[in-house]
Image (cartoon, rainbow, N blue to C red):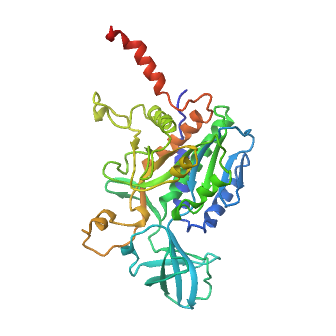
Amino acid sequence: MDTPSVAAQSRARHLDWLLALTDIPTVAGGEHRVVRWINTWLAERPDLTMTEDEHGNLTVRFADEPASDAPFYLTAHLDHPAFVVDRVVSPSVVELAFRGGVMDDYFKEARVVLIDRDDHTIRGTLAERVDGANPKFKTFLCELDRDDGSLRPGDIARWELPEAEITTIDGVECAATFACDDLAALAAALAAIDELRRLRAAGEAAGDVRLLMTRAEEVGFIGAIGACKSGTIEPGARLIALENSRSFPDSPIGGGPIVRVGDRITIFTPELTAAVAQVAEKVSGAPAQPTAAQKQSEMPKWRWQRKLMAGGACEASVFCAFGHSSTCVCLPLGNYHNMADLTAAQAGTNTEPLRVGREYIAVSDYHGLVDLLLACCVELADPARAPMSSFRSRVDSLWDELRFVLK
């Protein structure tokens, strides 16, 4: 079966979704604005239906597809590191708790934008760090630019950053925006589901494909843990967790989407990882990097990578811990968690005060992720037609063809 292709006009639409979603204010426990966008998107697609579990995790599936014992999930989380208003101290000062992982140096006198429940905004500057209501969250006083009476506990604040745009960074066309992690992956998943709708309408695809959107990943995978504990995910499910992972020299931005074999916690389900890598190789027409018998110039333009990505952890480790078959596909990410110049910051070699910046991904990597997810949905959704790994069959073929050399 040929791998499905994405039309050029669809690429532009997918890019619009990327820029729109990644610019939405969101935080662990305050993902409602992203959910609002998704509801609007779903309203135009009556063939899709969405359910919500007791923890607020969302599952999208095809309305006319019978439930199977082994559904195929794409998963992405809806939050990004940001602040929540814990307390209003005065009309000009509020207390902000940061939900996420960012180095202390980046908070010093940082500028933030606060968004009230009616989406009105006011800017402010972080002041001293204080003891907050929850010791797990770094808490700061924030001095507002003007007196304001609209902010309430539970409102969101995020870094003050330039608007999202498509720009060139280090010679690569990139989307620079507030929250690639993980809304860029969510945009790619929605794009893949939308393309799958087109194939299903033409009778070219089937299978119990679902999209699971989890909450509060940035404070310890809380939504994913809840989904496992409450039975939101069926025992026979297979899950591809989608992420944006910090780019390193051996996992470059622009090098293609990454089939992630593990993270700093664990190695993912080998059979499912191998199956996804096989699909990536089929889409590309080549392995992730040249073999010893190949030249770089002989490699195709559609690029992909196969990496451990041990710089962080992801929800695939949670799913595996609960006995599910799970792996991860991610986008290489710049300015991880909005920390600009992070390598120098960690080495202590930065010569300027550390400041936050927009996260960024390569446009080509994003489109490549859509291609890969669509192909996985087509080829792996039916477990009877798509065994978890074909390596055993390749080994058997090698034995049949070359065992004569042992005689």
Image-quadrant location for residue 57: bottom right
Q: Which residue is located at x 54 percent, y 47 percent?
A: 320
Image-quadrant location for residue 170: bottom left
Please state if 368 lies on the left or on the right of 383 as rendered. Answer: left
Q: In this view, does 55 lie above or below 66?
A: below
Residue 356 at x, y = what percent? 39, 70
Quadrant occupied by the C terminus = top left
Say which of 396 and 11 sits in front.
Answer: 396
Please state if 42 lies on the left or on the right of 326 as rendered. Answer: right
Say which of 399 and 166 sits in front.
Answer: 399
Q: Which residue is located at x 32 percent, y 48 percent?
A: 250
Q: Can residue 214 be seen in this view?
A: no
Say which of 187 and 59 sits in front.
Answer: 59
Q: Is residue 357 above or below residue 38?
A: below
Residue 322 at x, y = what percent? 58, 48
Q: How many labels does the image show?
A: 0
Q: In this view, does 301 lie above or below 107?
A: above
Q: Which residue is located at x 72 percent, y 40 percent?
A: 67
Q: Is residue 294 visible?
A: yes
Residue 367 at x, y = what percent? 48, 46
Residue 5 at x, y = what percent? 53, 36
Q: Which residue is located at x 62 percent, y 82 percent?
A: 152
Quadrant occupied by the N terminus = top right
